[in-house]
Image (cartoon, rainbow, N blue to C red):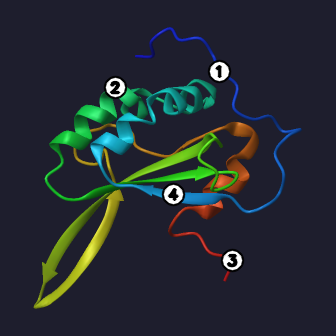
Amino acid sequence: MRTNRTKRKIATADDASEAAVHIEVIETLASFNRLEENWNAVYDQDPDAQLFLSFRWLSVRLGQIPSPWIILAAKESDSAETPYLGFLPLRIRFKAQEARFHNELNMAGNFAADYTGILSVPAVEHRVIPASPGTSSR
């Protein structure tokens, strides 16, 4: 269920250049909490956003995940003043199978959410999604 928030515009198709986006890794709840206003602005613009990607739900969930987690946060540049345009919340799970060890990336809401995914400003999602892991131009 979405809350009634004022829509805040982050980017439009006219101001979205085709340059590569800058990805930052968010690894702590304190860092995540500082993103609340920007997160909510992206959430408000993303037509596919749902409860399990809301800041409120995810902030509780991240505090409950026993394994490490990260959020990949995309923005136009590495400037601190530049707002984020997209977020991909992930959890890192250590796996041991047949005497082999590896890390596994899952969506941060997995095992507790009906839906998971990526948040993105629609005008730039074609640039944010290719910057995510698991996508390659090779």
Q: Are marks 1 and 3 in contact (CB under 8 Å)?
A: no
Q: Which mark is residue 56?
A: 2
Q: Which mark is residue 24?
A: 4
The image shows residue 47 at horizontal and vertical percentages of 61, 29
Q: Is residue 50 left or right of residue 46?
A: left
Pointer 4 local density, CA inside 10 Å: few below 14, some 14–19, many at least 20? some
Q: Is residue 26 left or right of residue 6?
A: left
Question: Which of labels 2 and 4 is toward the front?
Answer: 4
C-alpha separation, residue under disc 1 versus residue under disc 3: 32 Å
Q: Which residue does the numbered mark 1 point to in the structure image? A: 8
Q: Amino acid at mark 1?
A: Arg
* Residue 32 found in image quarter: top left
Q: Residue at x 17, y 74 (%)?
A: 95
C-alpha separation, residue under disc 4 versus residue under disc 3: 20 Å
Residue closer to the observer: 81 or 66: 81
Q: Residue at x 14, y 83 (%)?
A: 97
Marked residue nearer the N-terminal end (1 or 3): 1
C-alpha separation, residue under disc 2 versus residue under disc 4: 21 Å
Marked residue nearer the N-terminal end (4 or 1): 1
The image shows residue 101 at horizontal and vertical percentages of 18, 84
Q: Which mark is residue 48?
A: none
Q: Amino acid at mark 3?
A: Ser
Q: Residue at x 10, y 91 (%)?
A: 99
